[in-house]
């Protein structure tokens, strides 16, 4: 009989092995983020499993960051680390349980389709060769990785559109979204991008948290800090990523801001704004509604019925990027959330919500911005 081995020694690999002695009783536990109590992300490879009927369990779900996020969840599986699909997953006895018959000797399991640091470097490298792009390194993370900014267009343009992604590194759909957005923006055969770059300059941070992404964290960077609670007073010691981005925002100004995320529990695409800010203005009310109406027109994946209820963030409100930017710059400021599960309005039982759908949403987002850009000048 083949000996089972587990591999996590790759970018974003993460799992704690409890027992792998029996194909019918492979037991694991989800690891905590680096220097943090958060736990939800997993990504590992099983080897020696060809033609085996496997039964896996991931235990202690009540100790994860979002226990309700496991309801109606289906695990992501891949043989080649490129094509990912979903398999039925049972939540029972505080465990995530998977029964899977492997066609090949090695198989990967992940919380969501990964977006590797290597792919991030390729995205930055390809953009860097475009005549439309200026690549800036705003600073470095706690572990010395670049905080990459892509400036697309003429920086003298008055309309400054900022988009950041992956403050929470396990929300990999956010960088898939950014890849789709960036590729569409840089396609000069595309009349939407050509028009946008006449009217605005884009400041794009595809991965706010490269340390956390590399370590396989769900929500924190290498210091154990949740970046999206650091916007009131970021520090070089705990949150250099936010510190350097804020510094650049003050230098450039912000006319429009989007923070791209994924939500563990809500199976829909939705937005959350800064309307609970005491400073929320009539100008912001008008442009926010105009953008929401535009996004509804360009993609059926987006909806406004389901999302966060008022008061969702309570005392944390001021420290969140969308709230801070909206308050400081009196501009359109929105968080976009995509599901870790599926979009219940448009179900895909094979893939659920995945990298490709996130990529396509990034393209649609560009069209929605084009529909409102003339109103922010």
Image (cartoon, rainbow, N blue to C red):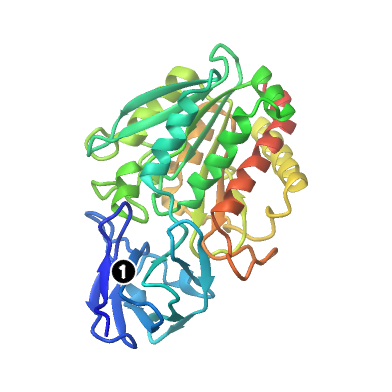
Query: Is residue 325 depicted above or below 5 in this figure?
Result: above
Q: How many marks?
A: 1
x then y, percent, for residue 84: 50, 62
Q: Residue at x 38, y 77 (%)?
A: 50
Q: Residues within 10 Å of mark 1 (few under 14, many from 20)?
A: many
Whole-percent x and y of residue 340?
51, 61
Q: Quadrant of the C terminus?
A: top right
Dot 1 falls on a residue whose secondary structure is loop
Q: Is residue 104 left or right of residue 348?
A: left
Q: Is residue 312 above or below residue 156?
A: below
What's the residue at 70%, 36% (across, down)?
A: 367
Quarter of the image where one finds residue 193: top right
Q: Which residue is under mark 1?
A: 30
Q: Say whether residue 70 is visible.
A: yes
Looking at the image, residue 335 lies above or below residue 104: above
Residue at the (44%, 42%) spot, across then down: 318
Q: Position of residue 347 (x, y in %)?
A: 66, 67
């Amino acid at each position: 009989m083949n000996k089972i081995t587990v591999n996590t020694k790759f970018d974003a690999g993460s799992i704690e092995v409890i027992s792998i002695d029996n194909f019918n009783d492979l037991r694991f536990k989800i690891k905590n983020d680096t220097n943090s109590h958060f736990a939800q992300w997993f990504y590992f490879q099983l080897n020696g499993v060809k033609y085996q009927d496997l039964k896996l369990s991931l235990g202690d779900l009540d100790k994860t960051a979002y226990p309700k996020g496991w309801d109606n969840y289906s695990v992501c599986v891949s043989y080649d680390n490129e094509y990912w699909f979903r398999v039925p997953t049972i939540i029972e006895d505080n465990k995530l349980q998977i029964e899977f018959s492997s066609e090949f000797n090695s198989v990967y399991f992940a919380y969501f389709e990964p977006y590797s640091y290597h792919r991030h470097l390729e995205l930055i490298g390809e953009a860097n060769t475009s005549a439309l792009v200026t690549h800036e390194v705003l600073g470095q993370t706690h572990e010395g990785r670049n905080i990459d900014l892509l400036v697309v267009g003429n920086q003298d343009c008055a309309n400054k559109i900022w988009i950041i992604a992956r403050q929470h590194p396990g929300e990999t759909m956010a960088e898939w979204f950014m890849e789709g957005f960036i590729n569409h923006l840089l396609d000069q055969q595309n009349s939407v991008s050509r028009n946008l770059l006449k009217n605005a300059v884009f400041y794009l941070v595809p991965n706010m948290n490269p340390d956390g992404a590399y370590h396989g964290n769900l929500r924190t960077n290498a210091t154990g800090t949740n970046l999206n609670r650091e916007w009131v007073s970021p520090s070089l010691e705990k949150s250099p990523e936010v510190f350097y981005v804020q510094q650049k925002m003050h230098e450039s100004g912000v006319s429009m801001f989007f923070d791209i995320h994924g939500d563990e529990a809500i199976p829909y695409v939705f937005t959350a704004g800064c309307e609970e800010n005491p400073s929320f203005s009539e100008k912001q009310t008008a442009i926010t509604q105009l953008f929401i109406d535009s996004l509804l027109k360009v993609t059926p994946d987006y909806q406004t019925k389901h999302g966060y209820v008022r008061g969702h963030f309570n005392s944390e409100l001021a420290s969140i990027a969308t709230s801070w930017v909206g308050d400081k710059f009196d501009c359109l400021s929105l968080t976009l959330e995509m599901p870790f599960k599926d979009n219940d309005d448009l179900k895909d039982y094979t893939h659920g919500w995945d990298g490709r759908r996130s990529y396509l949403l990034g393209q649609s987002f560009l069209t929605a911005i084009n529909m409102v850009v003339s109103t922010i000048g």
